[in-house]
Image (spheres, rainbow, N blue to C red):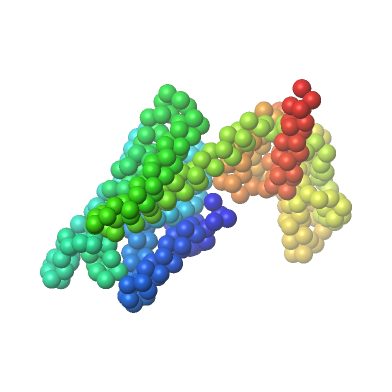
């Protein structure tokens, strides 16, 4: 998600990001105005109006998500709407519930339609000379009319049963009851990509119909809409593929069993010496074989700088999450992301038997994949 997007800041504690294709659309708007001799600022304003239409629907969806107790980590803005990333596993599970899916799917188009009605009413009262129903509905030469119709088009677009559009998410919910979450997402995403491809091909075909106004008025929207539906479906499908892989891996498969620990009675200077000769950034603190805390290299340094030498027990964190050996890596990654953890101890009872860190995770996953491949070859 992050590789093809740019940050827009935070709103209500949620990271906002805009996809690269949204910026590509700005370039196309500027190019189109140059071809028809329209001032460039109008293209920028038209692009901002589309961005506003997307933001309007996402604000409504964020409010509904908060009402249902769904916590979000980030929103990726696409021209067809936004893709949510959830803050923790509980929120992801709650967002998959039928009632929550339905309310979030309905509120987006309703917000766009309501905004279109409000803008149309304002135009009718303040500027009655503006012909709202004249064609073309969306054009840089008539920005107020475009503000109405872009919201209407975005609302109607999300009633198409193509994942990740709103109606597509409802379709996925229906598939989930008979196929399970993973297969349902893959089926809905695949259908969305097929519909997106059909829209693109249909838009191209319209260009070759002689003496037809549809070729110039409808074709660009079909091509762009289909393209962005296809891209959105691919993004969701890639996320599902990654999730399905990590859900088959257990913590036992990737945990480090050769790691350094500290004791509560170790001095901070001794702890720093051990940190110098270790690749770990965080250390489990054990009393005997039992895990009692976690301390970071940075925490040791800060304590030494501010208070001088002391004991590890004075700076260690006693609040931490642990995993069991058979817990799935997928659930732990979501917990690590939600709690911003960089080390997770793996325990049996109170005894620590391994650790998983962000540092070793990618290396361990790569080695595990190679091990499984060689095992299949030998079999």
Residue at the spot 44% in from the left edge and 67% down from the top edge: 27
Image coordinates of residue 29 in percent, x first then y, are: 38, 67
Q: Nearer the viewer, residue 182 or 42?
A: 42
Q: Is residue 252 visible?
A: yes
Q: Which of the 4 quarters of the picture holds residue 159?
A: top left
Q: Is residue 160 left or right of residue 18?
A: left
Vertical position of residue 209 compared to residue 254: above or below? below
Residue at the spot 23% in from the left edge and 61% down from the top edge: 137
Image coordinates of residue 241 in percent, x first then y, are: 57, 38
Q: Nearer the viewer, residue 331 or 154?
A: 154
Q: Is residue 47 left or right of residue 362?
A: left
Residue at the spot 64% in from the left edge and 47% down from the top edge: 341
- Total tally of numbered discs in the picture: 0
Image coordinates of residue 256 in percent, x first then y, are: 77, 38
Image coordinates of residue 119 in percent, x first then y, are: 22, 62
Vertical position of residue 45 compared to residue 272: above or below? below
Q: Is residue 314 visible?
A: no
- The quadrant of the picture occupied by the C terminus is top right
Residue at the spot 27% in from the left edge and 68% down from the top edge: 143
Q: Which of the 4 quarters of the picture holds residue 47?
A: bottom left
């Amino acid at each position: 998600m992050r590789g093809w997007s740019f940050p827009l800041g935070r709103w209500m504690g949620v990271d906002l990001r805009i996809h690269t294709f949204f910026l590509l659309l700005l370039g196309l708007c500027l190019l189109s105005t140059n071809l028809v001799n329209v001032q460039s600022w109008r293209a920028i304003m038209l692009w901002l109006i589309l961005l506003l239409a997307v933001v309007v629907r996402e604000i409504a969806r964020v409010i509904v998500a908060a009402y249902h107790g769904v916590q979000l980590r980030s929103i990726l803005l696409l021209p067809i709407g936004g893709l949510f990333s959830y803050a923790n596993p509980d929120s992801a599970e709650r967002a998959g519930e039928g009632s929550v899916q339905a309310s979030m799917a309905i509120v987006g188009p309703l917000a766009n339609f309501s905004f279109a009605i409000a803008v149309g009413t304002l135009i009718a009262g303040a500027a009655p000379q503006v012909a709202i129903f004249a064609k073309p509905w969306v054009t840089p030469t008539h920005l107020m009319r475009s503000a109405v119709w872009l919201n209407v088009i975005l609302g109607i677009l999300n009633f198409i049963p193509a994942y990740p559009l709103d109606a597509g998410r409802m379709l996925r919910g229906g598939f989930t009851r008979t196929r399970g979450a993973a297969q349902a997402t893959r089926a809905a995403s695949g259908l969305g990509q097929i519909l997106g491809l059909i829209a693109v091909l249909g838009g191209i075909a319209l260009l070759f119909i002689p003496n037809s106004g549809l070729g110039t008025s409808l074709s660009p929207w079909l091509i762009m809409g289909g393209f962005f539906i296809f891209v959105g479906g691919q993004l969701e499908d890639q996320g599902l593929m990654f999730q399905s892989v990590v859900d088959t891996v257990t913590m036992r498969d990737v945990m480090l069993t050769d790691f350094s620990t500290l004791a509560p009675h170790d001095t901070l200077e001794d702890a720093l010496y051990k940190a110098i000769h270790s690749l770990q950034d965080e250390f489990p603190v054990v009393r005997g074989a039992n895990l009692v805390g976690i301390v970071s290299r940075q925490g040791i340094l800060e304590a030494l700088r501010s208070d001088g030498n002391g004991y590890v027990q004075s700076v260690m964190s006693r609040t931490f999450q642990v995993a069991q050996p058979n817990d799935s890596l997928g659930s732990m990654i979501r917990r690590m992301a939600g709690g911003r953890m960089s080390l997770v101890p793996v325990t049996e009872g109170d005894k620590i038997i391994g650790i998983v860190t962000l540092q070793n995770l990618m290396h361990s996953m790569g080695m595990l994949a190679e091990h499984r491949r060689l095992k299949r070859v030998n079999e």
